[in-house]
């Protein structure tokens, strides 16, 4: 099995890429793809760049050029649910494009010609990633100690709906509007649902796992940058390590 790994920022991907052994490097469409072994698993990893279009073109190339069997999208997100704090982990159940609106031609959020307003992650994928995150939280005591020293404690995991769009949610007003329109959504980011649409088109399984970097409010840009620079890479690599151990058992 060949596992595709994507992230929208270099800080989310650098440690993953550095850990890949026997790397082959390919440049396609202004992206650099790294193929090799990560903890004994054959992978292709890539920094996709921000936003739905960049993520969709990268995912398409992953599928057509490299023939990946499944894709994991990893990285950070802003919390929409008041239950989530910085450092918490979300596994995507359903993925919505919150900026898709073709009314009155079709209902809000419906993806044209699909009849779908969201893309649902197969339960088996959710269960496997949930176990990986559980193992990460249980086994990585030193990392949790580091987080605690920076006032990130009682880290928890939540399985829930994720909203994607080409908007950085960075005000209380934006957050409240999104929550009102999509009340089941627990966090927001800029890529996952676009990759889900591509994966659905090609029949490739996807799992999206996000770490909360900010509260999607007026301080979001400060919190997000600080968290990404300090912790995003460690989260992504550690969770992937646990995930790979499970799927290779």
Image (cartoon, rainbow, N blue to C red):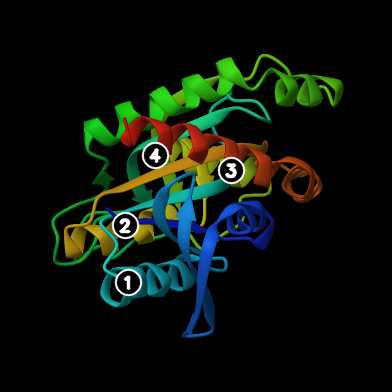
**Cα separation between marks 3 and 1:** 21 Å
Give the structural element (helix, strand or loop) at label 4.
loop
- Residue name at image x 46 percent, y 24 percent: 158
For label 3, the residue is 237
For label 4, the residue is 182
Residues marked 1 and 4 touching at CB (< 8 Å): no
Place of residue 102 in the rendered image (x, y in percent of width and height, measured from the top left): 28, 65
In this view, the residue in front, 111 or 4, is 4
Q: Nearer the viewer, mark 1 or mark 4?
A: 1
Q: Is residue 62 left or right of residue 74?
A: left
- Residue name at image x 38 percent, y 69 percent: 56
Q: Residues within 10 Å of mark 1 (few under 14, many from 20)?
A: some
Dot label at residue 66: 1
Give the structural element (helix, strand or loop) at label 3.
helix
**Cα separation between marks 1 and 2:** 9 Å
For label 2, the residue is 2
């Amino acid at each position: 099995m060949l596992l595709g790994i994507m992230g929208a920022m270099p800080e989310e991907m650098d440690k993953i890429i550095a850990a890949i052994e026997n790397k082959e490097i390919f440049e396609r469409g202004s992206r650099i793809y790294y193929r090799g072994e990560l903890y004994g698993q054959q992978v292709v990893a890539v920094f996709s760049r921000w936003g739905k279009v960049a993520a969709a073109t990268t995912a398409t190339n992953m599928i057509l050029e490299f023939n990946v069997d499944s894709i994991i999208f990893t990285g950070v997100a802003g919390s929409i649910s008041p239950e989530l704090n910085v450092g918490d982990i979300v596994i995507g159940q359903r993925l919505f494009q919150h900026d898709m609106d073709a009314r009155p031609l079709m209902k809000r959020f419906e993806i044209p010609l699909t009849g779908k307003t969201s893309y649902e992650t197969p339960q088996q994928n959710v269960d496997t990633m949930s176990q990986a995150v559980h193992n990460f939280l249980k086994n990585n005591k030193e990392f949790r100690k580091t987080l605690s020293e920076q006032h990130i404690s009682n880290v928890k995991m939540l399985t829930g709906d994720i909203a994607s769009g080409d908007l950085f949610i960075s005000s209380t007003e934006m957050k409240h509007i999104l929550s009102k329109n999509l009340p089941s959504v627990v966090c927001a980011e800029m890529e996952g649902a676009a990759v889900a649409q591509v994966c659905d088109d090609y029949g490739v399984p996807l799992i999206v796992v996000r770490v909360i970097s900010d509260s999607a409010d007026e301080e979001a840009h400060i919190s997000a940058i600080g968290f990404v620079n300090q912790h995003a890479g460690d989260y992504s690599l550690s969770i992937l390590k646990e995930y790979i151990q499970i799927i290779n058992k």
